[in-house]
């Protein structure tokens, strides 16, 4: 089977519930050389640790607002350093960061210094009416970030994580009211962010509402640009 042969540094963009986490899991299974980092998962683990960043972030997340740019840039940059991802041979995937133009600009400076710029950005374009239904059906394993849906990818044992057998839970920010705020916030930030990556020539868009449309397109796009 074809694989990735040149360094891929991929950013997945998309509304809350568009499937960033789900496509990430599929990509990690299909391409074992990819490592991933989800800003939402990093924040939720900081909250579980009750760290100073977790305490700061928790209030924003509960209200469906974005955590301030300076906090996010600091948090994610230090993760990139710890993971040794700041070099030109690194292959990785970011889910959920950057999500504002100032975050993208700040990250771009840091990555440029290491010759490790993001070289592909993919926007997952899913109708927002479809997304609202998905969130009702979403259950998560908080410690790992693994995502399930009662309809689309149910756990093998109801309400239990497939790997650890631990209980699944609902995210605090998945209530109808907070979810609508997250969507509104996404819609207000996305255009300048897309313009930033469009100007760099890295932006792609994949559209699809039903279960198995997006992944084959994503796989093809990656192989055409980074595989053999
Ligand atoms: P984050 O955790 O990143 O949440 P989000 O962007 O709102 O996205 P979600 O995780 O809700 O959705 P997803 O796209 O991963 O979809 P999923 O694969 O689960 O961020 C949370 C909060 O943290 C933010 O609101 C903000 O406060 C803060 N934050 C994070 N990053 C930040 C940043 N950079 N700056 C500032 N603040 C930040 O799929 C959804 C459901 O649909 C699942 O149940 C899944 O099984 C199902 N599904 C997926 N694909 C399909 C399909 N093809 N067909 C049918 N069902 C599907
Ligand atoms: Mg997610």
Image (tube, helix red, strand yellow):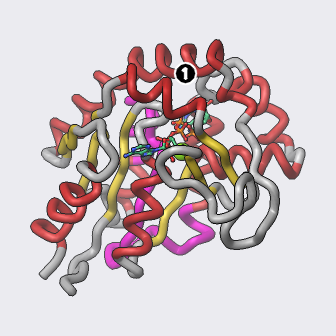
Residue closest to the eye, 161 or 154: 154
| Direction from residue 228 to residue 15 in the image, left or right | right
Q: Residue at x 38, y 36 (%)?
A: 14
Write down the quadrant of residue 131 in the picture.
Answer: top left
Please identify the residue farthest to the right as the structure is shown. Answer: 50
Q: Which residues are magenta?
A: 80-107
Q: Is residue 63 located in the magenta-colored stretch of the structure?
A: no
Q: Is residue 205 above or below residue 113?
A: above
Query: Quick one: 149 or 60, which is closer to the camera?
Result: 149
Task: State which quadrant residue 63 falls in.
Answer: top right
The image shows residue 83 at horizontal and vertical percentages of 57, 71
Determine which quarter of the picture holds residue 120.
bottom left
- Kindly state the secondary structure of the residue where label 1 is placed: helix
- Above or below: residue 90 compared with residue 59: below
Q: Position of residue 85 (x, y in %)?
A: 47, 70
Q: Is residue 184 left or right of residue 143?
A: left
Q: Which residue is depicted at the point 75% across and 31% down? A: 172
Check mark 1 vs ligand 1: CB closer than 8 Å? yes or no. yes
Answer above or below: position of 195 versus 72.
above
Does residue 43 show up? yes
Q: Could you tell me residue 3's position as x and y percent?
A: 24, 82
Residue located 17% across and 37% down the image:
198
Is residue 106 visible in this depiction of the protein? no
Q: Residue at x 22, y 29 (%)?
A: 195
> Disc 1 marks which residue?
182
- Nearer the observer, 75 or 218: 218
Indicate whether 33 appears above or below 63.
below
The N terminus: image quadrant = bottom left
Q: Quadrant of the C terminus?
A: bottom left
User: Where residue 4 appears, x then y in whole percent?
Assistant: 24, 78
């Amino acid at each position: 089977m074809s694989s990735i042969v040149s360094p891929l540094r991929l950013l997945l963009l998309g509304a809350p519930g568009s499937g960033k986490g789900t496509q990430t899991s599929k990509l990690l299974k299909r391409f074992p050389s990819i490592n991933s980092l989800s800003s939402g998962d990093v924040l939720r683990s900081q909250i579980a640790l009750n760290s100073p960043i977790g305490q700061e972030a928790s209030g924003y997340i509960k209200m469906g607002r974005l955590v301030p740019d300076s906090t996010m840039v600091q948090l994610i940059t230090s993760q990139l350093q710890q993971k040794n991802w700041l070099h030109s041979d690194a292959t990785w995937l970011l889910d959920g960061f950057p999500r504002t133009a100032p975050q993208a600009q700040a990250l771009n400076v840091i990555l440029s210094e290491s010759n490790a710029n993001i070289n592909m950005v993919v926007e997952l374009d899913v109708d927002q009416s479809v997304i609202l239904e998905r969130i009702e059906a979403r259950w998560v394993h908080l410690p790992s970030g693994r995502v399930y849906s009662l309809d689309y990818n149910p756990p093998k044992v109801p309400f239990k994580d497939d790997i650890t057998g631990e209980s699944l839970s609902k995210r605090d920010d998945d209530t109808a009211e907070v979810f609508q705020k997250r969507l509104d916030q996404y819609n207000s930030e996305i255009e300048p962010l897309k313009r930033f990556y469009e100007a760099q020539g890295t932006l792609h868009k994949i559209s699809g509402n039903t279960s198995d449309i997006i992944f084959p397109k994503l796989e093809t796009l990656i192989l055409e640009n980074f595989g053999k």
